Amino acid sequence: MCGGREKTRLEGWRDPVAGKDYDLLECSACALVYAWPLMFPGGDWYEKFNYVGGYDETAAQASKTDFPYFLDRLPEPNRGRFLDVGCAAGHFLRMAKARGYDVEGLEVDDRFVKRARDSGVPVTKGILDEAFASARAGTCDVVSMLEVLEHVDDPRGFLALAAKILKPGGRLLVAVPDNRRPTPFGRDYFDYPPHHLTRWKPEPLRRALESAGLRVEEIFAKPLPVIDLSRIWADRSAQAILRAIKRIRYGRGAAARPMDEILAAEPGGASAVPDKAARLRAVFFYHSVFNTVTWPLFGAMTLYYRLTRPGMGHTLLAVARKGER
């Protein structure tokens, strides 16, 4: 990202999906953290990793908070062509369409593509590559990539392709998790490779955007929410409860096995427990109860971090502009 050669090894990680080992390295010059080997795992890996049914709850919450926050950074009037790279089920695009944009999505996961198309959002199945960018060169007023850049193995090239699609004067919206946020209880497993290949702070993000020929208008952090701390313990305690239930119902060896695998091995097992969608709804309900009950504790911790780490947040949002001809 910056041309620096010195790096520090932070930790190792084994991907539980594919069993591959990674090193987490930090550039001594610009503080970008990246995985090695730095390689996008492909759509097949994501289909094994992602619980698409659980995405709706997260996206619904983002539709109320994050998405309006991002769209409000764009200048009026809200019209023109709007491309969302990594659009998932199209929640952000539906909101952009409601504000007057002519929208299109790009998504690698077949399940999300179907969901977006079923909701009336035009989506192309694939990745942002040279062929896609060349076919749409200079056609878009806005290109967004919300929590996408940390998933790609060539961030500079990826941003250059996005810049190619923009019209002169068009804007690029980039959101990435803020690597300055506190992690007193460790990191979520999805913040490790190959799901997240890079971890960003403002300076390397600025360098990356400028290397793509874009002028950075602003980089700011969305404030740290209380749930960013409490959800880790909500998730850990939910997993412990589920392991205990499987151990009691199916024996000690079942605790670490996926429920679908257990049910597939037992004749008539599928009728003994709720389906996956129902199980996910129960987990989300538990998370809601846990987060509500523990709000005073984690709220005090969040306030402490906001006061002691000014400018830090949950997500970094950058707005960059392509130069006029």
Image (cartoon, rainbow, N blue to C red):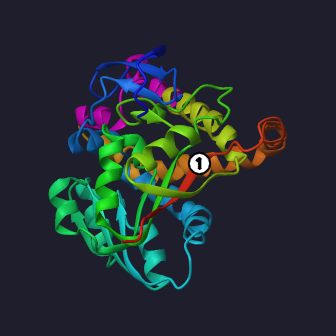
Q: Is 109 placed left or right of 233 in the picture?
A: left
In the rendered image, the vertical position of residue 73 relative to residue 258, given as above or below: below
Where does the image place residue 41, in percent across and percent down from the top left?
A: 25, 35
Disc 1 crowd rating (10 Å Cα; few below 14, some 14-19, many 20+) is: many
Q: Residue at x 36, y 72 (%)?
A: 325
Q: Is residue 232 magenta?
A: no
The three-letter amino acid code for the residue at tag 1 is Thr
Q: Which residue is mark 1?
A: 315
Q: Residue at x 63, y 45 (%)?
A: 314
Where does the image place residue 162, in percent across and percent down from the top left?
A: 33, 58
Q: Residue at x 78, y 37 (%)?
A: 305
In the rendered image, the vertical position of residue 8 relative to residue 264, given as above or below: above
In the rendered image, the vertical position of residue 50 relative to residue 196, given as above or below: below
Nearer to the camera, 87 or 320: 320
Magenta: main secondary structure equals helix
Where does the image place residue 220, in percent across and percent down from the top left?
A: 64, 52
Nearer to the camera, 108 or 136: 136
Nearer to the camera, 172 or 144: 172
Q: Residue at x 27, y 26 (%)?
A: 18
Count the labels in the image: 1
Q: Is residue 51 visible?
A: yes
Nearer to the camera, 170 or 291: 170
The magenta region covers: 244-266
Residue 144's quadrant in the figure?
Answer: bottom left
